[in-house]
Image: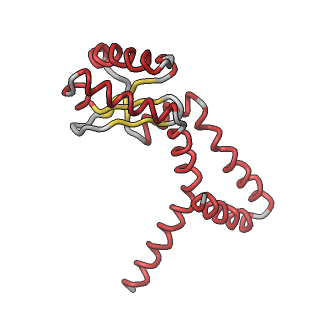
Amino acid sequence: MPNFLCSLVIVGMVALFLGGIGLILVLLWLLSGLLIFNRAAEGVIARHLLRLRYPTQQELARLQPVWHEVTARAGVEGRTYQLWIEDSDDLNAVAAAGHIVGVTRFAVDRLPSGQLAAVLAHELGHHIGGHSWSTLLGYWYALPGRLAWRVVRGAAAGVRRF
């Protein structure tokens, strides 16, 4: 909440500077959070922000049986979510937006099925708990404040060099 309020102040200050169109800017910024609830926007987030890609047929053949087991045990419809791959040699996974479950190529290629199931179940738990929505909304609405902070830090560094 503090990050959102800081960002709201920043957006409000910019809106005051822009005059009448500034109010429209504030409203558009507030409404823009609704975009993350759109499936097409989720794909953009997965590709461009999270650097994920669709699984290959071989990766799908490995993931789908494990995913089916995890979602069946959780009593959740597995087709609700999209499986994505991060090209990384590290062990990691992500639950993002409303329907994205991403795992690293390392997890798919190297983990035994039981461990891969545990990773996928962990990420599914984030979705069921609503963590992925709240995290993404928090990130999005805190962005103007973070950008303003970077500008201030850059200006301060420039003043110190001068």
Return the residue found at the far left. 110
Name the quadrant of the C terminus.
bottom left
In which image quadrant can residue 62 be found?
A: top left
In percent of the image, x 42 and y 18: which residue is there?
A: 73
Name the quadrant of the N terminus.
bottom right
Q: Is residue 39 left or right of residue 66?
A: right
Note whether 160 is above or below 66 in the view shown.
below
Note whether 118 is above or below 145 in the view shown.
above
Q: Position of residue 155 (x, y in %)?
A: 47, 76
Q: Position of residue 29 (x, y in %)?
A: 67, 50
Q: How is the image coloured?
A: secondary structure
In percent of the image, x 63 and y 43: which residue is there?
A: 33
Nearest to the observer: residue 130 or residue 74 = 74
In percent of the image, x 52 and y 35: which residue is there?
A: 129
In percent of the image, x 34 and y 22: which residue is there?
A: 55
Q: Position of residue 85 (x, y in %)?
A: 34, 29
Nearest to the observer: residue 118 or residue 102 = 118
Return the residue found at the far right. 20
In which image quadrant can residue 46 be found?
A: top left
In which image quadrant can residue 122 be found?
A: top left
Count of residue discs? 0
